[in-house]
Every structure is written in structure tokens, then in C-alpha cells.
């Protein structure tokens, strides 16, 4: 007959489990660090989110949330010089779309832009500005016609136009719509219905802000200077 012997092995002590848990904690912490964004150096804290740049207070302009980069385009100015995206770089530019046979909207816009130009020249002479009138009627608005029309409002103003497809492509980029309207009872034969919006591009050639009609020169000039100051920060 075999004698049954009692199991004399001591039960596991709680301290043993605690020791095992302590050994695993560094590995668990390392895994969580990778899962939550990768390892960091000791004492390194997550960088706080960058604060949004304050927006200038504007009276009339609509500021884009972020400037819109423009694709290359090719027009010709009234001097016969290529007018491309590079012509917008290096200065702030105001762009107006229209045509020289426009009976009211276009001459009114150019007259207002002339007042804006005088205000900017007096109040902010160190910032280079340019005003460009882009004709969407290339069939009638030749270089000679633009030369006689555009500088009449201000000697610094530049006129530009181009092939219909090039004009459509540029207008589409900046959200300008226009259409030809037949006018059989008119000596002009047809009219062009352009948008009255005036656009502001920045020195990188990006669309920065726009102005809807009616245009108030004093408010526009104040807005432009506020936008320029904010962009310089």
C-alpha cells in the first residue's frame, strides 16, 4: 500500500503577481505611446495647436479663408506685352472684368477704382499696387481700344485681354461669370453681361479677397490697407 503524501508546495503569494505586473508596466506604457502618436523623448509634451491668425476687421471686402492659388494663364496687355500669372506677383493687384463698350457698370467700377488708387497712393505710398481691367470682349477690345479707354480713368491702370478660351479659363478660376447678350436693336449689335465684382490678389499671385457692388472707394481703400497689414504679419 502506497502512502499518500500531502502536497507541501506553498500557494502563490500576491507579491509574485505584483512583481510580474511591475515588470510589464514599461512595455504597456511604450505600446500606448506608439498607439497615441509615437514615442516622445522623456519630458517632452505635445505641442499646443497653433492659434489662428486674427482676421482684420473689414467694412466691405470678403476675405477668403485662405488665398486661392491661380493656375497659369496667358493674356496680352494694352502695351502688347504678355500678361501672365507672373505679372500679378510682387504686388497687390485689383482686377476688374468688363469691356469698353459697357454702358454703365464698367466705367463706374473704373471711376471708383481711380478714387481707391488716389487714396492708396496718398495713405500707403510704400506698398506697390496695380489695377488691371480685363476685357471679356476681345473681338472689339483691341490693344488700341484698351489704350484709349483704360488709362483715361488713371494713367497707371493696365488693360488686358486674350483669346476667348483663355479669358473663360481665368474667369472660371476666380468665380467671374459673363455672357454675351444679343442686342439687335442696338448699334453695338451685342452687349456683354459681366460680373461687377472686383478682386484683390496678393503678391504671390493668389486670389485673396473680393468686393461686391456697390463699391465705396473710401471703405475699399481702408479694407485693402488692413488686409495688407495683416498679410505682412
Image: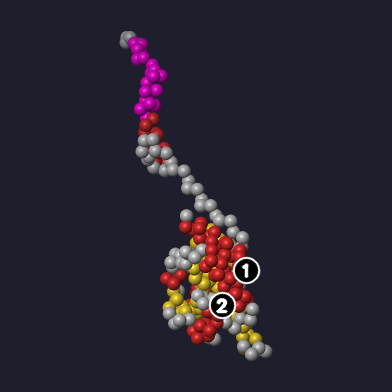
Which residue is at the front of the view, 124 or 191? 124
* x and y percentages locating residue 187 in the rendered image: 64, 90
Residue indicated by mark 2 = 153
Residue drawn 58% across the image and 56% down it: 57
Number of on-image labels: 2
Q: Is residue 19 magenta?
A: yes
Residue drawn 39% across the image and 26% down it: 21
Q: Is residue 133 above or below residue 217?
A: below
The magenta region covers 5-24
Residue indicated by mark 1 = 215
* x and y percentages locating residue 80 in the rendered image: 44, 82
Q: Residues within 10 Å of mark 2 (few under 14, many from 20)?
A: some
Q: Residue furthest left?
A: 2
Q: Is residue 69 visible?
A: no
Residue drawn 63% across the image and 81% down it: 103
Local secondary structure at mark 1: loop
Q: Is residue 167 above or below residue 59?
A: below
Q: Is residue 152 above or below residue 32?
A: below
Amino acid at each position: 500500500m502506497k502512502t499518500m503524501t500531502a502536497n507541501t508546495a506553498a500557494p502563490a503569494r500576491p507579491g509574485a503577481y505584483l512583481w510580474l505586473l511591475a515588470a510589464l508596466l514599461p512595455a504597456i506604457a511604450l505600446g500606448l505611446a506608439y498607439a497615441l502618436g509615437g514615442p516622445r523623448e522623456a519630458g517632452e509634451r505635445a505641442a499646443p495647436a497653433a492659434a489662428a491668425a486674427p482676421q482684420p476687421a473689414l467694412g466691405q471686402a470678403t476675405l477668403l479663408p485662405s488665398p486661392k492659388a491661380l493656375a497659369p494663364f496667358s493674356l496680352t496687355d494694352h502695351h502688347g506685352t504678355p500678361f501672365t500669372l507672373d505679372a500679378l506677383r510682387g504686388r497687390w493687384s485689383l482686377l476688374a472684368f468688363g469691356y469698353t463698350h459697357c454702358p454703365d457698370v464698367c466705367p463706374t467700377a473704373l471711376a471708383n477704382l481711380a478714387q481707391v488708387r488716389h487714396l492708396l497712393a496718398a495713405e500707403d505710398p510704400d506698398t506697390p499696387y496695380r489695377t488691371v481691367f480685363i476685357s471679356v470682349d476681345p473681338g472689339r477690345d483691341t490693344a488700341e481700344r484698351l489704350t484709349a479707354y483704360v488709362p483715361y480713368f488713371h494713367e497707371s491702370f493696365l488693360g488686358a485681354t486674350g483669346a476667348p478660351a483663355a479669358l473663360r479659363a481665368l474667369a472660371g478660376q476666380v468665380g467671374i461669370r459673363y455672357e454675351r447678350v444679343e442686342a439687335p436693336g442696338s448699334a453695338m449689335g451685342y452687349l456683354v453681361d459681366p460680373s461687377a465684382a472686383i478682386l484683390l490678389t496678393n503678391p504671390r499671385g493668389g486670389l485673396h479677397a473680393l468686393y461686391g457692388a456697390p463699391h465705396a472707394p473710401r471703405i475699399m481703400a481702408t479694407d485693402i490697407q488692413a488686409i495688407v497689414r495683416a498679410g505682412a504679419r
